Amino acid sequence: SLGRDGVKFIITQSAVQLIFADDLTRIKNLIEWKDETIALQTIVSFVEPTEELVRLAEEKKLKILTLDQLREIGRNNPVEVVPPKSTDTALIMYTSGSTGAPKGCILSHRSFIVAIFGILSSINLTSVPKDEAIPRVLNYMPLAHVFGCGTIVALSLLGGEAGFWQGKVEKLIDDFRDFRPTVLAMVPRLLNKLYDKVRLELRKKGVIGRVLFRLAIRGKLALIRRGNFSRNTIWDKIIFEKIRQS
């Protein structure tokens, strides 16, 4: 979502020294940008780099490591854990740069933790009882978005599972059906698409079906406002479970 120029700008401005890349084209781009991204020293590749890319990287005084090599280095060189201070920088979250170059927002560990617990508190999920299934989040938002990133970290904190959409809006319903998430990181545009799908199905149900649906919405909202997030209500059984399965 940031585009080639945006990514190059971010790497340069933030003085990134190590970066992860998931395909050979991106690795080649990073090598070609080395003269502008002076601080970059190491590329960690999720795929096996070609000999040509390794040679080009060496010419630019860049090191390419595979993920397995990085893990091995970590195993052979253990270091003491250095806990961060709450005021230390946790991450720099960049905008998409829709009005010029991307702008970086520096988030401290304190700020990011507050954001994470804000997400968890808003969905009544600050802990997971032992007798309940672990939460599963389908992340539609990119990790280069504080909501998407925060959701993944928040669910990881609880030992949850994260799934990532296929990258195509028209396949989102398939993603929902396959992954069966209990939590969704969404934006209004996506909610509108789901709402339109439900309304389309409602038109086929007739007057009684539409009346029942409105009653279910009111009843469910009333329960949620009272702090009841149960998925085992009468409305879930007769209305919402069918929607989830569809």
Image (cartoon, rainbow, N blue to C red):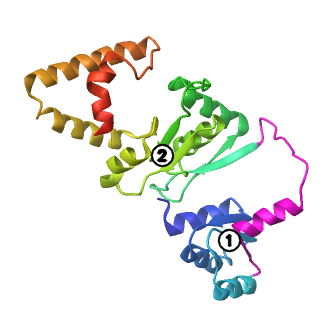
Q: Is residue 80 magenta?
A: yes
* Residue 59 magenta-highlighted: no
Q: Amino acid at mark 1?
A: Thr
Residue at screen point 11% across, 35% down? 204
Q: Secondary structure at mark 1?
A: loop
- What is the distance, in whole Å, between disc 1 and disc 2 at their CAs? 30 Å
Residue 48 drawn at (x, y percent): 64, 76
Q: Earlier in the sequence, mark 1 or mark 2?
A: 1
The residue sitting at 30% across, 19% down in the picture is 235
Q: Can residue 40 be seen here? A: no
Q: Is residue 94 above or below residue 115?
A: below
At label 2, the amino acid type is Asn
Q: Residue 37 — which label?
A: 1
Left or right position of 64 against 220 = right
Count of numbered marks:
2
The magenta region covers 61-88
Residue 193: x and y, percent? 28, 43
Task: Classify residue 115 by image quadrant.
Answer: top right
**Where residue 139 is drawn, which disc sits there?**
2
Is residue 47 placed above or below 151 in the rendered structure? Answer: below
